[in-house]
Image (spheres, grey):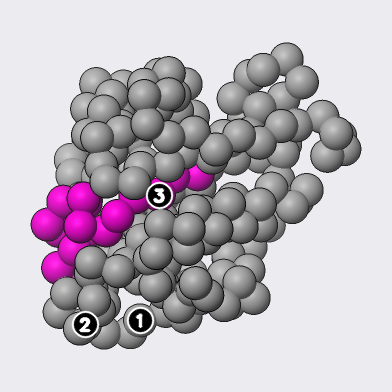
């Protein structure tokens, strides 16, 4: 499949409402994979995404196939619009929050990976953040031990990709967030590391 078969669009404002249903389903499908192992449910996803759509400078970058089906997306918003648990590790690390743009999820169906879409997700969000006068971008990612029993043999960490994009992990900023790894199972605490890059305005 070539690049001509997919189409990217940056969505914000009132148009975000139309993204909620397909994005909720996509998040559940992709985050069920390693390393997140997230057993999600649509009710929670709808609440989360509707709150996100109200965030300051909320953005969704969508990628669709030639039939208009959503196959991936990435999100971003002002970090101060995120809930307190996301903000505290950065605040404790001394990061200026009012000039920081937060990248939420990047989710892409497996068959569409390896075509450069991940780079385009970052390009568009970084450009949007710079246009809105944010000085830095950050995101957080789950931390898994190298010998995790559910790690697939062909798994490739994204750390090298993020480093090439200019992001550095903040060792002093670690959050802990709960989600179930099995359907109707218990909430499990997961460490999340923060990555940050200064932007060119």
Q: Eyeballing the image, is 124 above or below 191?
A: above
Q: Nearer the viewer, mark 1 or mark 3?
A: 3
Instruction: Give the residue drawn at x 49%, y 53%.
Output: 128
Mark 2: give few (<14), some (14-19) or many (20+) Cα within 10 Å. Answer: few
Mark 1: give few (<14), some (14-19) or many (20+) Cα within 10 Å. Answer: some
Which image quarter is the N terminus in?
Answer: top right
Q: Residue furthest top?
A: 67
Secondary structure at badge 2 equals: loop
Identify the residue position indicated by label 1 in the image: 170
Span colored in magenta:
73-89
Front-lying residue, 14 or 51? 14
Front-lying residue, 143 or 170? 170
Instruction: Give the residue drawn at x 66%, y 57%.
Output: 119
The mark that comes first in sequence, 1 or 2, is 2
Q: Eyeballing the image, is 46 above or below 27?
A: above
Distance in Å between CA atoms under marks 2 and 3: 21 Å
Q: Position of residue 91 (x, y in %)?
A: 17, 74
Q: Are circles 1 and 3 on residues that touch, CB within 8 Å?
A: no
Instruction: Give the residue drawn at x 39%, y 72%.
Output: 135
Q: Quadrant of residue 185?
A: top left
Identify the residue position indicated by label 2 in the image: 93
Residue 103 appears in view: yes
Checking the image for residue 76, the label placed there is 3
In magenta stretch: residue 141: no
Q: Are circles 1 and 2 on residues that touch, CB within 8 Å?
A: yes
Q: Position of residue 77 (x, y in %)?
A: 34, 50
Q: Are circles 2 and 3 on residues that touch, CB within 8 Å?
A: no
Secondary structure at badge 1 equals: strand
Q: Eyeballing the image, is 165 above or below 78?
A: below
The mark that comes first in sequence, 2 or 3, is 3
Q: Position of residue 16 (x, y in %)?
A: 40, 27
Mark 3: give few (<14), some (14-19) or many (20+) Cα within 10 Å. Answer: many
């Amino acid at each position: 499949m070539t690049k001509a078969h997919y189409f990217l669009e940056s969505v914000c404002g009132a148009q975000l409402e139309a993204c909620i249903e397909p994005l909720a389903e996509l998040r559940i499908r992709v985050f069920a994979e390693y390393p997140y192992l997230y057993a999600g449910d649509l009710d929670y996803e709808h609440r989360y995404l509707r709150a996100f759509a109200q965030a300051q400078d909320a953005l969704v970058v969508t990628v669709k196939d030639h039939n208009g089906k959503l196959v991936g997306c990435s999100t971003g918003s002002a970090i101060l619009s995120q809930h307190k648990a996301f903000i505290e590790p950065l605040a404790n690390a001394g990061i200026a929050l009012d000039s920081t743009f937060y990248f939420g999820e990047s989710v892409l169906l497996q068959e569409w990976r390896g075509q450069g879409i991940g780079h385009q997700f970052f390009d568009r969000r970084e450009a949007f953040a710079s246009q809105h006068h944010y000085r830095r971008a950050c995101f957080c990612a789950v931390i898994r031990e190298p010998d995790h029993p559910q790690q697939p043999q062909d798994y490739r960490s994204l750390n090298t990709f993020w480093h090439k994009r200019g992001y550095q992990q903040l060792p002093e900023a670690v959050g802990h967030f709960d989600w179930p790894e099995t359907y109707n199972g218990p909430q499990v605490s997961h460490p999340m590391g923060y990555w940050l890059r200064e932007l060119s305005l």
